[in-house]
Image: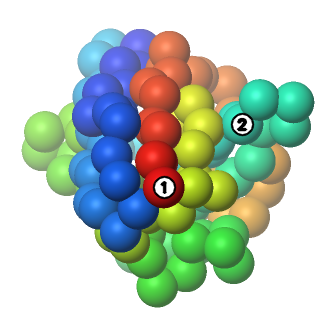
């Protein structure tokens, strides 16, 4: 499966962005998906994940209550709605997929397929 992330940009503190990850190739509903981010000098970290049917979702503590992950399997797309953005959310955001029901809170090593990344910069 091929993944294409989009929707990043430069925004001010408190703004919102919605990232999209469009999948092509095999049936996307067979894959669990996740959003990760990597800030300069830091390791890539899980932001949120969603099961292949959208029933189970997970978030890292720092984004709970602000970010929402969702998916539309009919459109082969996973979304990350980001509200109340903070400077510490600045990073390159990547979508990823793995051929299993759910990725849960697993880190990047679980995932086999990656999008190219989209930059999110939150200015104070």
The residue that disc 1 covers is: 124
* Horizontal relation, residue 114 to residue 3: left or right: right
Placement of 24 over or under 80, stated as above or below? above
The residue that disc 2 covers is: 39
Crowd rating for badge 2 (residues with CA inside 10 Å; few <14, some 14–19, many 20+): some
Is residue 93 visible to the viewer in this orientation of the structure? yes
* Whole-number angstrom distance, CA of label 1 to CA of label 2: 16 Å
Looking at this rendering, what residue extends furthest in the front direction? 124
Q: Secondary structure at mark 2?
A: loop
Crowd rating for badge 1 (residues with CA inside 10 Å; few <14, some 14–19, many 20+): few
Looking at this rendering, what residue extends furthest in the left direction? 74
Measured as percent of width and height from the top left, residue 2 is found at 41, 14
Q: Which of the two discs, 1 and 2, labels the residue nearer the N terminus?
A: 2
Displayed quadrant of residue 49: bottom right
Nearer-the-camera pick, 76 or 91: 91
Is residue 27 visible to the viewer in this orientation of the structure? no
Measured as percent of width and height from the top left, residue 52 is found at 43, 55
Instruction: Report the residue at 35% width, 53% height from top.
Output: 12
* Horizontal relation, residue 113 to residue 1: left or right: right
Nearer-the-camera pick, 65 or 52: 65
Displayed quadrant of residue 27: top left
Instruction: Report the residue at 74% width, 64% height from top.
Output: 105
Instruction: Report the residue at 72% width, 36% height from top.
Output: 39
Measured as percent of width and height from the top left, residue 124 is found at 48, 55
Q: Secondary structure at mark 1?
A: loop
Q: Nearer the viewer, mark 1 or mark 2?
A: 1
Displayed quadrant of residue 58: bottom right
Instruction: Report the residue at 50% width, 15% height from top.
Output: 116
Placement of 96 over or under 87, stated as above or below? above
Contact (Cβ within 8 Å) of mark 1 with mark 2: no
**Image quadrant occupied by the N terminus:** top left
Mark linked to residue 26: none
């Amino acid at each position: 499966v091929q993944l294409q992330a989009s929707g990043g940009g430069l925004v001010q503190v408190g703004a919102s962005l919605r990232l999209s990850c469009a999948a092509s190739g095999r049936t996307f509903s067979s894959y669990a998906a996740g959003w990760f981010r990597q800030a300069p000098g830091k390791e890539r970290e899980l932001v949120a994940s969603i099961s292949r049917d959208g029933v189970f979702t997970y978030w890292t503590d720092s984004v709970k209550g602000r970010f929402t992950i969702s998916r539309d399997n009919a459109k082969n797309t996973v979304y990350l709605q980001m509200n109340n953005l903070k400077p510490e959310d600045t990073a390159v955001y990547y979508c990823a997929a793995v051929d299993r029901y759910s990725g849960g809170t697993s880190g990047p090593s679980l995932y086999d397929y990656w999008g190219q990344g989209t930059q999110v910069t939150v200015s104070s």
